[in-house]
Image: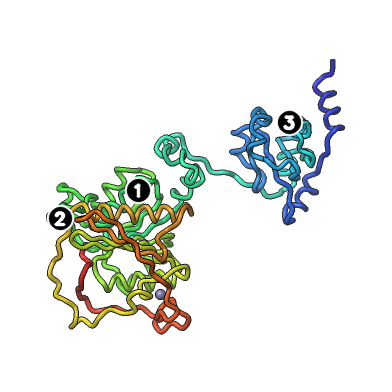
Amino acid sequence: MATYRELLARVKEEIDEVSSSELLGRLDDSDRPLLLDVREQDEWQEGHLPGAVHVPRGNLEARVEAVLPDRSREIVVYCAVGARSAFATKSLIELGYDNVASLAGGFTDWKRNGYDFQTPRALSAAQRARYSRHILIPEVGEEGQQKLLDARVLLIGAGGLGSPASLYLAAAGVGTLGIVDADVVDDSNLQRQIVHSTNTLGEPKVLSAKQTIEALNPDVTVVPYQERLTSENVERILADGWDVIVDGADNFPTRYLVNDASVWHDIPVVHGSIYRFEGQVTVFHPYVGPCYRCLYPSPPPPELAPSCAEGGVLGVLPGIVGSLQASEALKLIIGAGETLTGRLLLFDALHTTFDEVSVKKDPGCPVCGDSPSITEYIDYVEFCQGPVHV
Ligand SMILES: [Zn+2]
């Protein structure tokens, strides 16, 4: 009967080993070997080789065919010191993998040499429970959830569209939400602006929203900007760093400011607008698709705009449009699916129909076109027109 030491020595004679320095020299090659980490979950969590695939030794034979279907692929297996990986390498050879080696000295030797390694971040037990329905979706999973927690979304407006959008983004675990709104909560808002409540009447909307959102999800930090977006403050607000802008603005001057800023800072904008029973949603992704000015190069002169009389809106309509905006923002963050870039979605609540028109990037656009004529912010005079009431 062989002792463990004898068995290990015999296995090591039957397999190939590579040293840390040999492996390091191969990592920048286009035909770099696939790195297979066979340690336990807690060891993996403490750090692993860059780009490695993790299959614990105990599950190796059962799972490896699903994880590594190509048996001719070059593989370097590693563990902590090179013993478990030696046995794993032998098993892989027996399973028909014909280009496998074990990392001599394992992760311990790799680290001792001062070579690069990655430390995966893990969700806490509370986060695993809270986001379990996300983690179950392959397009999101733990990695997507981490992206959401790391993401920063700027909402323009805490009104009809900003209410459902901010609530769903917060519930989904988007880690930082900036909210720009100068108004206070008014009793005529509560028919649709569900992030506010009777208890917060008279309070600044950004603070009312912050209170509701942070009660919903303590993972979320709300950054309130109790001001109206202008050419004076737009750069300061954007300097805080945002991945996506959700535009729920109710006026044209803000809409043009958001557009020009987003193009110059290359931040995608999820645009929504509502009027009575009709809603519109699209994504303005700078240089990928059209921007707002590709569709409407400049606003009409104020004297031609209709009066600023209040427009009506069905209470639930911003709920639907704002939720669609949240859905687009989540997809932009996790990088899944197909967004509304280049497509304008039209919703009619009165007849319950969705229509779609394609919108194109205009090479002659004054902001995102080939030779832009607008290179500085423009503060348009406040005016009102058509279907933009939130
Ligand atoms: Zn454009």
The kind of residue tagged 2 is Gly
Q: What element carries label 1?
A: helix
Foreground residue among 260 and 219: 260
Crowdedness near tag 1: few (<14), some (14–19) or many (≥20) residues, C-alpha within 10 Å: many
State yes or no: Cβ of the residue under disc 2 lies below 8 Å from any atom of ligand 1: no
Disc 2, SS: loop
Which of the 4 quarters of the picture holds residue 5? top right
Q: Which quarter of the picture shows residue 351?
A: bottom left
Pointer 3 or 2: first along the chain = 3
Query: Is residue 226 something one can see in this rendering?
Result: no
Question: Which numbered dot is residue 84?
Answer: 3
Measure the alpha-carbon separation of dots 3 and 1.
43 Å
Q: Name the residue under label 1.
A: 170
Q: Which residue is drawn at 52% across and 40% down?
A: 122
Q: Between 322 and 27, which is closer to the camera in this rendering?
A: 322
- Name the residue located 39 percent from the left edge and 44 percent from the top edge: 219
Q: Whole-Å distance between the Cαs marked 1 and 2?
A: 23 Å
Residue type, mark 1 in image: Ala
Q: Distance between the residues labelled 3 and 2?
A: 65 Å
Please give the residue where the numbered disc 2 appears in the rendered image.
Answer: 202
Label 3 crowd bin: few (<14), some (14–19), many (20+), radius 10 Å = some
Numbered disc total: 3
